Amino acid sequence: MALQVGDRAPEFTLPRVGGGAVSLSAYRGGWVVLVFLRYLG
Amino acid sequence: MAQLRPSYPELRAAGSEVLLICFDTLERAERYAGEQGLPFPLLVDSERRVYRAYGLEQGALWRFLTPKVALGALRMLEGGRQLQRPHEDPLQLGGDFVVDPNGLLALVHPCRDPTDRPSAATLLAAVSQTAVEP
């Protein structure tokens, strides 16, 4: 089932360039733009 | 991503954070971020678990052979840029999502082909909505 507007955004924790990890839930209370890249460039 | 960079201050001013996610190796991502001086946090999803969780599948080959994609490649060549070879999986498609302060999706845009990305203005409009109360 494809994600739809209004669905809960799937939570994730990923390593961050520069060190540490980032969880989507850390941004609760603010807007987040997620940009999934095809490749670096 | 390049088209987003000029809008980053506006997106931040609208109270949003922009997270870039790639599926390259951490080492290559670190080198790239260092070369580019990225203003955005860059996250690495080497196993593409989050790509799959957001429904970003590998595109069928025919999606890469459309006139629009070919035109985009030509424009890059005209602009003096070399065509960059996608690392590891040229069929992986990207996507853009906006998450509201409650953790709900306000914009869902899985790319249908490599040129199919929302404009920075579209993303800015999405984060400028005021109907959502955190």
Image: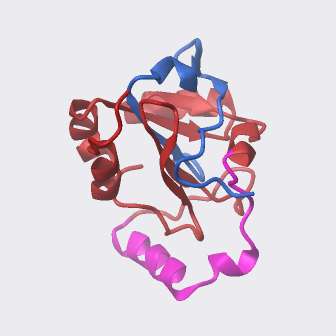
Chain colours: A blue, B red
Which residue is drawn at the image coordinates 53% and 87% (left, top)? B67
| Image coords of residue B29 (percent x, y) | 58, 32
| Residue at x-position 60% and y-position 53% | A38
Q: Is residue B97 visible?
A: yes
Q: Is residue A7 left or right of residue B16?
A: right
Query: Relative to B13, is B4 above or below?
Result: below
Residue B83 vs residue B1, the one in the foreground = B1
- Is B17 in front, or is B78? B17
**Residue B46 placement, left or right of A22:** right
- At 70% from the left and 39% from the top, the residue drawn is B50
Give residue B43's quadrant in the image. Answer: top right
Q: Quadrant of the C terminus of chain B?
A: top left
Where, by quadrant of the figure, is residue B72 drawn?
bottom left
| Residue B97 rendering spot, x and y as whole percentages | 50, 48
Q: Which residues are magenta?
A: B54-80
In the rendered image, residue B43 lying in the magenta stretch gets the answer no
Q: Vertical placement of A29 versus B49: above or below?
A: above
From this view, report whether residue B95 is shown above or below residue A24: below
Q: Residue at x 29, y 48 (%)?
A: B124
